[in-house]
Amino acid sequence: MKRGHQEVDGVTDDGGGAQTSTYRKLVEEDEDDKLLAELGYKVRLSSMTDVADKLEKLEMAIDFDAGTAGFGFDGVGVGVGLGVDNNNTSVLSHLASETVHYDPSDLNSWVENMLSGLKLPPSLEDKDEEQVDDLAAIIPASTRRIKISTISTISTNLPQPQIPALLVEDSQEAGIHLVHALLACANAIHQQNNPLAETLIAKITLLAASQGGAMRKVATYFAGALALRIYHPIHSSPNTIKSETNSSDHLETHFYEACPYLKFAHFSANQAIFEAFAGKPHVHVIDLGLKHGMQWPPLMQALSLRPEGPPLFRLTGIGAPQPINPNGLEEVGWKLAELAESLHIKFEYRHIVTNSLADLEPYMFDLNTDQQSSTVAVNSVLEFHRLLASPNTIEKVLETVRSLKPAILTVFEQEANHNGTVFVDRFTEALHYYSNIFDSLEGGCAMTTDLAMSEMYLGQQICNVVACEGRERKERHENAKQWKKRFFAAGFEMAPLGSNVFRQASLLLEFDSGKEGCRVEENDGCLMLGWHSRPLFTTSAWRIPSYLASSSIAAVATTAISSLRDVVDRSEYLI
């Protein structure tokens, strides 16, 4: 086995080529050592061969000792009977203790202590250290505690020797290492250490392949987003990323079918709107993101069954331009009109196409003709967080909404904090958030088209949160506490969601999802839908305080009285 000695020295018979290859090997080992250090492991890759060798010797020694003084199983010897050496008994007792050694450097010294306390078989005592360097040739695959992958080291005409590289076997431990690698990669990008980030992405890809289910999918999407963030200035343009989100409306339809989250949003908002419309003969719903209009047929059916009869129902749908189907919003209106006719509801519909909700003005909603008689409700499902990419935009939209004097404003948003300025914090929050959503999508369900498209829908969001900055980053989710500050500042107050909304939403969740992990709870005036203990989405309702709703009338009266006083004063002066 002189070949192993020659590898360490870097001296072979083929000249400079071998020395270059040896240098490359040393560089690779140094990079791997830096990678392990970055992940928080105090161990060098070069020491793993020695550790694995000693573990193999320890296993053989225990088997030998157990065969002479007791019994052994699966590489663990337990001494029993009268013929056990007291020293060996204490050593084996220590071996069977509950001490856990996570650091391989500690494991190295621990194995040495075990070997010194055991009676080694003659075959092991006489072995020279140089004869056990090549673990790929000595350790049988069936008895290895550590999986061995090989890396070529030296270019020779002979079969190339191999250096073992550590690959974690336990799935749970690999999952922990995968999360550590993702966080380390995000930190490397934050510190603009792109070479290290590229190396980590390669490691993440390998670790993700060893996982199954939700963890593998989440890691793959985040690794892709991290890679896009690194190469974005070179390989992509803003138009490329925007084109990837053009199909989000279509993917959102599949997300609606695959899981209960959007159904919960529609149902809880409809219930709150229905209660606000109680006894009103003329009602007007303004949907800030109509899309396919799936939310409104259930509300129309409920209105048609009112004891006092159905009201006149007006719907204004707002949406972005659709290059593929420019008449999409108009087609939605025709379908809803057919439904209204079958339900014997008087129905009026108009749509507004705009690139941004910030372009909306109060006059566009044609409320002057029926403002005194119509009860207005404004609805937003996953729309407001996109306005945070531009300064003062959300404030302008909320001001427009308030000018419409709605009886109720229903809002459904992600319960997350993906709008922070520090990339690492935003990445960490997003990793935990989307891991829970993907976990809830698994739920023992077989893969379907809806599920596959839903994963793509979430993957687009992950890409936008991680890879984009500035105005390109549209997925700026905030939690309920942050949204409350914005709505309070805009002059709204919370409209209580009645207990009936909670009961109906819980019933819907029970029948629709069939997943024990989905939970709905009331939290400080909001309804939160989550997976186990993690809230994922929040529904809230808002209204204009009564003293603000009547402020315009008071202002008109004050102006009129002031004008009358001026006239009286002038009359007295003339007299």
Image (cartoon, helix red, strand yellow):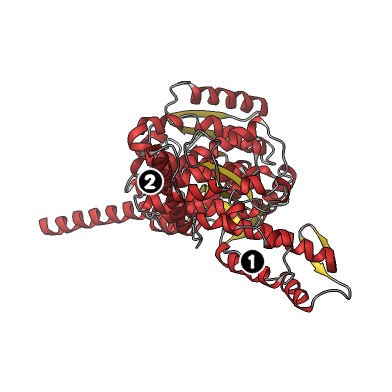
Please report the residue visible at 45 percent of the width from the left and 50 percent of the height from the top: 9
* Of 121 and 205, the residue lying toward us: 121
Q: Name the residue under label 1.
A: 111
Please tell me whether mark 2 sits on a helix, a strand or a loop.
Answer: helix
Q: Residue 351 carries which label?
A: none
Q: Mark 2 points at which residue?
A: 195
Please report the residue visible at 50 percent of the width from the left and 63 percent of the height from the top: 42
Please report the residue visible at 59 percent of the width from the left and 29 percent of the height from the top: 346
C-alpha gap between disc 2 and disc 1: 36 Å
Occupied quadrant, residue 313: top right
* Of 213 and 34, the residue lying toward us: 34
Task: Tell me the quadrant of the picture where the C terminus can be found.
Answer: bottom left
Do we see residue 280 in this rendering?
Answer: no
List x then y, in percent, for residue 294: 59, 33
Q: Residues within 10 Å of mark 1 (few under 14, many from 20)?
A: some
Q: What amino acid is labelled 1 in the image? A: Val
* Of 469 and 271, the residue lying toward us: 469
Please report the residue visible at 47 percent of the width from the left and 28 percent of the height from the top: 350
Q: How crowded is mark 2: few (under 14 residues within 10 Å), some or many (20 or more)?
A: few
* Of 491 and 76, the residue lying toward us: 76
